[in-house]
Image (tube, grey):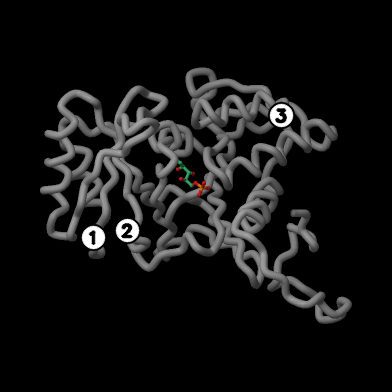
Amino acid sequence: MALAYDPLFITSEKSAMEAPSPPPMILTQDELKRIAAFKAVEFVESGMVLGLGTGSTAKHAVDRIGELLRQGKLENIVGIPTSKKTQEQALSVGIPLSDLDAHPVIDLSIDGADEVDPFLNLVKGRGGSLLREKMIEGASKKFVVIVDESKMVKHIGGSKLALPVEIVPFCWKFTAEKLRKLLEGYGCEANLRLGEKGKPFVTDNGNYIVDMYLDKDMGDLKVVSDEILRLPGVVEHGMFLDMASTVIIAGELGVKIKNKQAF
Ligand SMILES: O=C[C@H](O)[C@H](O)[C@H](O)COP(=O)(O)O
């Protein structure tokens, strides 16, 4: 459905002199994602090396970048895709691609998230792309996160949905049980993610994902992060701590932009 208003509209900047607003309309979650994505693409400048995120929100940003390239409003962009799916999409919309080997420093990454806490820590990876995302977004001078307001949580794990951990397939039950035990104080369940036909979901890197479900706030996330990463068999987890420079949140009342600061 076409948007009935300017997707780059920001509530807090609206002038009192403008014509009366149309009656409020209910936007779909996908329309909110698109609004956040369009806003993020305003940060893109010609000549930039861009980290291209994965998922239903990042997809709108990739489409928009392709559109601006075709219109000649952006030039000399190099995209670094965070998944095979984004690679295919970016090529289909005409974004020239490269990789981290050739471009170890990225100007700007734009990506969605599954959860955002008040300190701009994130959960990512419910689409399975967390490892490449963490490598690429961690190599970025600026990382802009785009979400609709449903992604905001009081604490990491607060949505009660999955905190994904990428693990090697070798003896996955052993690793999943180590993860469950490590976090059992937070009411943790650890389930192997399944894909098509009930077979294990396999990431772009040939690994499995264990989805952790938590009942309680984990407190010091840095400590928990280090403990998870120390387990042999774990490749990476989906907590992105202190990585986001900016979070753009689209909601029914407009767009909010939160910037990283010293908390
Ligand atoms: O692995 C997937 C990524 O981390 C996504 O960026 C994240 O799951 C958010 O996806 P979506 O924008 O579809 O909610």
- Which residue is drawn at the image coordinates 72% and 41% (left, top)? 64
Give the left or right position of residue 99, taking residue 169 as reference: right
Say which amino acid is labelled 2: Gly
Of mark 2 and mark 3, the one earlier in the sequence is 3
Say which amino acid is labelled 3: Val
Q: In front of the other: label 1 or label 3?
A: 3
- Which residue is drawn at the image coordinates 23% and 34% (left, top)? 234
- Note whether ligand 1 is within 8 Å of mark 3: no
Circles 1 and 3: CB atoms closer than 8 Å: no
Q: CA distance from mark 1 to mark 2?
A: 8 Å
Depth order, front residue of 212/102: 212
Please name the residue that numbered disc 3 is placed on: 93
Helix, strand, or loop for circle 3? loop
Say which amino acid is labelled 1: Met
Circles 1 and 2: CB atoms closer than 8 Å: yes
Position of residue 136 relative to residue 17, above or below, is above
Circles 2 and 3: CB atoms closer than 8 Å: no
